Each structure stands twice: as structure tokens, then as C-alpha cells.
Amino acid sequence: GENVEQHPSTLSVQEGDSAVIKCTYSDSASNYFPWYKQELGKRPQLIIDIRSNVGEKKDQRIAVTLNKTAKHFSLHITETQPEDSAVYFCAASQNTGFQKLVFGTGTRLLVSP
Amino acid sequence: NAGVTQTPKFQVLKTGQSMTLQCAQDMNHEYMSWYRQDPGMGLRLIHYSVGAGITDQGEVPNGYNVSRSTTEDFPLRLLSAAPSQTSVYFCASSRVRGQGRYEKLFFGSGTQLSVL
């Protein structure tokens, strides 16, 4: 089955810096890669996703890149703000009409003012 | 729409007790699933369902039972709770479309379960 590895487990940056979180996956059949943000005590919320036929996707300060050959994808956050502090999860799935997501172990991002 | 509703929010059990975590959605979603979240482990799929009467196992199904008698409800049963089942449990749902369609997964607010 699919296995998703995520690094780093914790990441501390200064406000205004960029943050990069990296994930690798094992199943070449996976074709959908969402990223979730989870604030303390809250539910995970989708922040951006990418499909296997796309190499990069941007949404304001957030971007995701995908390298299918190397089986890795990354989340990039620019101009970080204290409210970006949260745990971020990557995930992968085969889209067979629904998503059996396999999640990474999470990255705790701390943005200091 | 209330979205995905989970009850209870918190529960403490003694080893060997049984209980049911409730999950209901009002979005007419075909797909429903249960995840458990443990520190350093991410979210792991327990069971899922793609419609009433259809269920299947995820990554970590042992110790849990599910059934899907209606589109709206997908309860998770712990028959004999063990300390290893102490975790935060999330229910999630989405539409089911054909291949090539990517439907957003909606999460409930979670149930914090402690087994002593």
C-alpha cells in the first residue's frame, strides 16, 4: 500500500521568512496530493491540492510542487505570518471516485513575530 | 448545512468497555470514513464506506466495527476498549464521482477518547 513520509517534523521560522515542507510517496498509482492545515484543537482543513497532471499550483502565499518521477511533493509558504503557525499534513491517494487518503506524519510550523 | 457532526466530543472509558462514536452528515455524501490521530503518526484510516450497506477496512481496522445503514450516518463501534485506542477520532465525508473528479473531504470536529 501507499506510504507517505513527511519532513521536517518541526519547523521554526521568523515572520516574513519562507517555509518549505517536503513529502515523498511510494505508490506510483497515486494521483492526488492534498495538504491540510490543523490548528490546535481543530479539525484538519484543506488548504491546497495538486493532481498528478500538474507540476505546480499556487494560491496567494501558498504553492505546491510535484515531481512524479522522484515521487515527491512540497508545500511552500512565503511571507509567513504568526497565523500560519499550525500542524501541516500532506496526503496522497489514488482517485477512484473517492479519496482513501494516506497521510504523512505532520509538520509543526511555528512562526515567531 | 451542519456539515459533519461527531458526538461525543470527549469520552473516557475503562478497559473492556464498549461504546459507539457517532458521525452524521447532511450533505448527501456517499463516501464516509473514520480516521484516528495519534501524536507523531498523522491520521490513519480505520474504516470507510462508499454507500449504504457498503463498508471496507482501512489501514488500522482491528478493534473497530462499522456499519452504514443510511447515507447520513456512519457509527464507529469499539467492542472492548483498550488503552491503545486512546486517540482523537475524526469522521470525514465527501461526494463520490467518477475517476478524474476530485471531491473535497469534509472533516468533523473530532472525538477525544481516553481509555484507562
Image (spheres, coloured by chain):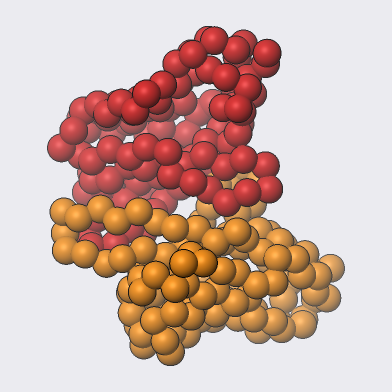
Chain colours: A red, B orange
Q: Position of residue A27 (x, y in %)?
A: 28, 46
Q: Position of residue B44 (x, y in %)?
A: 51, 56
- Location of the N terminus of chain A (image quadrant): bottom left
Asked whether, in this view, residue B66 is left or right of residue B11, the answer is left
Relative height, residue A108 to residue B11 (above, below): above
Asked whether A59 or B48 is in front, the reply is: A59
Q: Residue at x 36, y 59 (%)?
A: A100
**Residue A80 appears in view:** yes
Residue lying farthest front?
A: B1
Q: Residue at x 40, y 56 (%)?
A: B105
Residue A111: which quarter of the image? top right
Q: Residue at x 47, y 85 (%)?
A: B67
- Location of the C terminus of chain A (image quadrant): top right
**Residue A25 appears in view:** no
Report the label total: 0
Asked whether A7 or B32 is in front, the reply is: B32
Asked whether, in this view, residue B24 is left or right of residue A108, the answer is left
Q: Position of residue B28 (x, y in %)?
A: 36, 74
Q: Position of residue B5 (x, y in %)?
A: 56, 69
Q: Residue at x 35, y 46 (%)?
A: A92
Relative height, residue A103 to residue A73 (above, below): below
Residue A9: which quarter of the image? top right
Residue A49: which quarter of the image? top left
Relative height, residue B3 to residue B79 (above, below): above
